[in-house]
Every structure is written in structure tokens, then in C-alpha cells.
Image (spheres, rainbow, N blue to C red):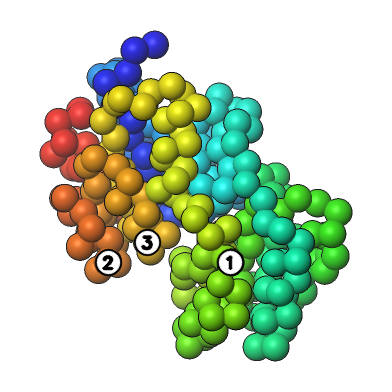
Amino acid sequence: MTYKGLVFFDLDGTLLDDKSQVSADNKRALDQLRQNGYLPIIATGRSIAELGDVLEQAEISSVVMMNGMAIYSDGKEVFSETIATETIEKLIKTARDLGEEIAYYTPTEIVLSGNCQGLTDHFVHFDGSQPQVDSDFYRTTAINMLLVGTADKSHDAIYHERVPELHFFRNSPYSIDVTKLGVDKGTGVAQMKQVLDLTDLPTYAFGDGLNDLPLLKAVDFPVAMANAVPEIKAAASYVTGHHLKDGIRQGLQHLGLI
């Protein structure tokens, strides 16, 4: 199929409602977007294991997941970055020095190094079930992304300082997303364009959280939701409506895509 452009959507606080579902209005907007010749793509910090039936609801099969650490196209993994074992061990030690634990992410599994309040609150916040604990999971399984469970924002800088080979960005009041340095949603945009062999098409993106900053910087037409953090609004060429008040439709109409 010949496309006119690629449109990337963050999920939480952007394409999804407060129950982690795709609203009826957003489904209609996505249908119109496809009919007009544009390809919708999800760009999320979530893994496939956390998407539930979101892909089916949105009728989207291309996903930049785990903040760019893995990419699925037409339901198949086409790109994957992993984090070195010694780096993971360095992060675990730092977390435990601070009384915290981490989560290990693959596209299909989430496992905890241990239990802590930050991790418990994180999965409640994102309407997810609490994963199992296996501290040594990373020793036998390739890990794509990590997550630190902490509500103490003063710890963010400590992680940056002690494990500089990783990229840390707070994505909830209770947790910090962690990727390999140099990998984020923005690099995911470039990888997806190469995978699809659509490098010359215009790109658009909708986002709200700090992990969407590289995403918005990577596209031609960045859009922030009304509920976005100030840094995202500052990086956007347009601020659309709230994600619970048809902000996706408003933004797509403003861009002339529907």
C-alpha cells in the first residue's frame, strides 16, 4: 500500500482513556486516518505483555515498544536492543542501596528483581497485575528494558550518576523507565521508517509524558496533548485537546490528516 505519512501515538495519557482503552471516538479517528492514506503506529514504553487487546482495539500492527528498545511490524519482532548483564547488576546494586527494586522487561514478559512500594504502585497506576519475582531472571534471558520502582524524585539524579551507560526518564509518579543509552522513542521512529522502507514520508506524533520528548523531537509535526507535561508542550508545534476530550481527533483535524 502507498502511504502519505506515518503517525505515531503514545498510549497512556494520549491514545488511551483513563481505563487503558481506545475510546469509540479514537477508533473512528484512526479509521478515518487509515482511509485517508496514513499509517498509524504505536510508540509506547509498554511491552507487548502490557498491551492487552489495545492493538486489536486500535487495529494497529506496527509498534515501537519499550521506548524504542524493540519494534514489531505486522505482529513480528523486526528490531531489538538488549542491556548488558553487568550493567543490569550495577543498576540492581544501586536500587537496593536506595531500598528499591527494578523490573526486567522483554517484549512478552515482565519480572521483578524483588518487591518494593514503588513497583507495586507503578503497576496499580497503569492498571496492570503485579508480575512475579525472580531476581536472577536477567542471567538467563535477554533484557530489553528496565524499570526502577521509586516515588522519590531525588533518586533520579543518583541513578543517572551511578549508571551513566543507561538512560533514565521518569514516566510515572512511582517509576523511572530505563533504556540503553542512545535508545528512545525517537530512535524508534528512525528504525521503524527503515523497517517499513518509508524513509521519505512525513512523520507526525502525539504524546504527553517525558518519555515522549525524543519522539516529538524526531518527527516533522509534533503534537502535545492538553494534559501533557510542560516540556512536551514546549517541544510541540501544536497543543491539542485533552486525551479524554477528543484531543486525538482535534489534533488530526488540525494537521489536515482527517
Q: Amino acid at mark 2?
A: Glu
Mark 1: few, some, or many residues within 10 Å (few <14, many ≥20)? Answer: some
Amino acid type at mark 1: Glu
Residue, disc 3: 209
Q: Residues within 10 Å of mark 3 (few under 14, many from 20)?
A: many
Where is 55 relative to 48, above or below? above
Horizontal relation, residue 258 to residue 146: left or right: left
Residue at 24% x, 47% y is: 222
Q: Which mark is residue 231?
A: 2
Residue carrying label 1: 165
Please tell me the numbered disc located at residue 207: none
Q: Quadrant of the C terminus?
A: top left
Secondary structure category for the residue under label 2: helix
Residue closest to the eye, 173 or 178: 178
Quarter occupied by residue 193 = top left
Packing grade of label 2 (10 A; few <14, some 14-19, many >=20) is: some
Q: Earlier in the sequence, mark 3 or mark 2?
A: 3
The quadrant of the image that shows the N terminus is: top left
Q: What is the x, y in percent for residue 153?
A: 47, 83
How many labels were placed on the picture? 3
Alpha carbon separation for disc pair 1 and 2: 24 Å
Task: Assess whether mark 3 and mark 1 are in contact (beta carbons under 8 angstroms).
Answer: no
Residue 146: % across, % down: 63, 62
The x and y percentages for residue 148 are 61, 72
Distance in Å between CA atoms under marks 3 and 2: 8 Å
